[in-house]
Image: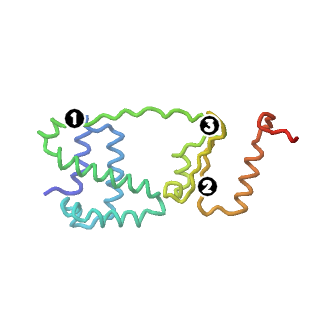
């Protein structure tokens, strides 16, 4: 009978067999560690019991950690635990491990935004303010002129004083351009 601890050992074996890069293994182990704190003895001793109670355990993990992690991070941890379980079920047998050809994902850097107003990285904004990832914002993209756009991310409960402050800041950025002014006649 497989135990929860066997998942950690499986990940180590997968790294030694070059099925997971070290960074992936560390991420999977971090997710398992988060879940491990919520397991009772029966779930630690029987991986089938863990799988059976997975949704309830996940709910417990979410409730206990919602102050420390945003919803997106918790969903990522959940998917990592599911990946570890799936791979364990498929490839824990050494013969199956040898025939395992994991998909290699090559990530490239994102191209820089051409927006002249401000460089806004959605990921960094979401990290600083979890409400952005939870949909509590308005995202407005404005095409100002050909090739020039502005992205505005504002909380759904924007206050009047905050709107006035934003208006003042944007107004201070304005560069006088006579080509946009229409003559009074």
Disc 3 designates what residue? 115
- What secondary structure is found at the residue carrying circle 3? loop
- Report the disc number at residue 154: 2
**Residue under the point 76% across and 51% down:** 168
Q: Which mark is residue 24?
A: none
For the residue pair 60 and 29, the one nearer the viewer reads as: 60
The residue at 52%/51% (across/down) is 127
For label 1, the crowd category at 10 Å Cα-Cα, with few meaning under 14, some 14 to 19 and many 20 or more, is few
Q: Residue at x 74, y 49 (%)?
A: 169
The N terminus sits in image quarter: bottom left
> In this figure, which residue is indicated by the disc labeled 1?
101
Q: Secondary structure at mark 2?
A: strand
Q: Are marks 3 and 2 in contact (CB under 8 Å)?
A: no
Residue appearing at x 59%, y 34% in the figure: 114
Q: Is residue 94 left or right of residue 82?
A: left
Residue 117: image quadrant is top right
| Residue nearer the viewer, 73 or 180 | 180
- Where does residue 143 sit, x and y in percent of width and height? 62, 41
Mark 3 or mark 2: which comes first in sequence?
Answer: 3
Q: Is residue 63 above or below residue 116?
A: below
Image quarter hosting the C terminus? top right
Query: Would residue 101 appear left or right of 1 to someone viewing this image?
Result: right
Residue 84, image x and y in percent? 26, 49
Q: What is the CA distance from the residue labelled 3 to the residue labelled 2? A: 18 Å
Residue 56 appears left or right of 183: left
């Amino acid at each position: 009978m497989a135990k929860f601890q066997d998942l950690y050992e499986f990940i180590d074996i997968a790294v030694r067999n070059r099925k997971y890069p070290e960074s992936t293994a560390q991420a999977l182990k971090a997710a398992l560690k988060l879940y491990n704190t919520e397991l009772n003895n029966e779930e630690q001793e029987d991986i089938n019991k863990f799988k059976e109670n997975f949704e309830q355990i996940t709910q417990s993990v979410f409730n206990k950690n919602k102050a420390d992690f945003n919803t997106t991070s918790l969903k990522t941890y959940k998917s990592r635990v599911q990946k570890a379980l799936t791979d364990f079920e498929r490839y824990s047998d050494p013969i199956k491990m040898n025939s395992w050809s994991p998909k290699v994902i090559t990530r490239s850097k994102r191209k820089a935004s051409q927006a002249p107003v401000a460089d806004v990285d959605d990921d960094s904004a979401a990290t600083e303010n979890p409400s952005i990832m939870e949909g509590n914002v308005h995202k407005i993209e404005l095409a100002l002129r050909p090739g020039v756009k502005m992205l505005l991310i504002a909380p759904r409960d924007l206050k009047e004083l905050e709107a006035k402050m934003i208006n003042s800041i944007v107004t201070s950025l304005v560069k006088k351009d006579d080509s946009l002014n229409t003559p009074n006649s």
